[in-house]
Image (tube, grey):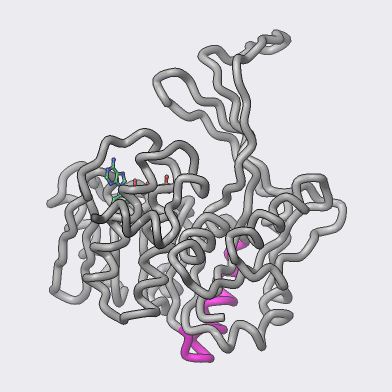
Amino acid sequence: MTIAVIGSNMVDLITYTNSLPKAGETLEAPDFAIGCGGKGANQAVAAAKMGGNVMMVSKVGDDLFAPNTVANLQQQGVDTRFVTTAPGTSSGVAPIFVDDQSQNRILIIKGANQQLKPADIDDAAEALKACQLIILQLEIPLETVYYAIDFARQHQITVILNPAPAVATLDIDYACKCDFFMPNETELEILTGLPVSSDEEVILAGQSLLKRGLKNLIITLGSRGSVWMSGDEIHRVAATPVQAVDTSGAGDAFIGCFAYLLVETGDVAAAMTQASAYAACSVTGRGTQRAYPDAESFQRFLN
Ligand code: ATP
């Protein structure tokens, strides 16, 4: 394996409706769908679909969603040897309500993801040591994230930390131990307490983090593209123009593709340009993982 994702998986329970029930009320909704999600799983699937050799360290619940989650990862080519069951716990689930304006209302029940502990990293240690890159997000306990960062440093493995969803108490000293810190603009705002409504404000907020010792900061800005800041260098990448249908999971598509290309080429700027096109391609379809192209479809999109 070359890439390990230590992180979450979730089951998206998507109800399509324009009206939500009040207390005591029962309403009928027109449509429903189930999808495999979770930031960790999304990023693992994106990297694997691009051709990466990817393993996941993750927890599933003790319920009927678990076999489906594992089977889905396997179908996408992700190694699931270290996706284990948390007894007596539900899988991570995300009830999502989507109206006809494509507005999402999302609840997250972390479930088994909260049971991913440092001991699970120890259990996967030999396989992890063989990886060149570890990707982390914040849908698992912070103590596990910190433990994984220290593990990676000890074994000279490159680390990408995607601080999502934003946790204001994230210890920035740990972020500084990572090779790449990749927030979106909202996460940047929460972490710095600074405004991010213009490109200039984004850069100022980014600089405030760099001053604290971050090595490489890559901020994704939705349809405004992305920016890589390192030392005094600022490298902007425009978004690839597309007709967006559903932007959910775009950040995960970007990170998974970026990680794969970083391992393959070591060229950060080129990896960002390609990841930007990959994420743009993903927003032209509905859903998250199902909208991520494989390497062949991505090539067709580029031509
Ligand atoms: P999510 O949390 O849904 O995974 P995010 O908010 O973390 O997403 P964004 O910053 O919205 O991530 O998007 C990541 C990248 O995807 C952007 O930097 C951009 O390259 C690409 N992207 C997102 N939205 C669009 C769009 N409408 N058109 C083209 N590219 C897009």
Q: In this view, does 56 lie to the left or right of 153?
A: right
Q: What stretch is highlighted in magenta?
A: 141-157
**Residue depicted at 60% across the width and 15% down the height:** 30
Q: Is residue 40 left or right of residue 197?
A: right
**Residue depicted at 52% across the width and 90% down the height:** 154
Quarter of the image with the N terminus is bottom right
Does the magenta portion include 153? yes
Q: Is residue 267 left or right of residue 86?
A: left
**Residue depicted at 30% across the width and 51% down the height:** 301
Question: Compared with residue 65, is residue 137 higher up or lower down, i.e. above or below?
Answer: below
Does the magenta portion include 240? no
**Residue depicted at 51% across the width and 29% down the height:** 105
Kindly indicate the quadrant of the structure image that contains residue 275.
Answer: bottom left
Residue 206 at what x, y percent from top left?
24, 61
Residue 170 at what x, y percent from top left?
47, 62
Quarter of the image with the C terminus is bottom left
Residue 221 at what x, y percent from top left?
27, 49
Residue 79 at what x, y percent from top left?
64, 70
Kindly indicate the quadrant of the structure image that contains residue 227.
Answer: bottom left
Q: Main secondary structure of the magenta part?
A: helix
Residue lying furthest bottom: 155
Question: Compared with residue 130, is residue 99 higher up or lower down, i.e. above or below?
Answer: above
Question: Compared with residue 126, is residue 4 higher up or lower down, i.e. above or below?
Answer: above
Number of numbered labels in the structure image = 0
Residue lying furthest right: 88
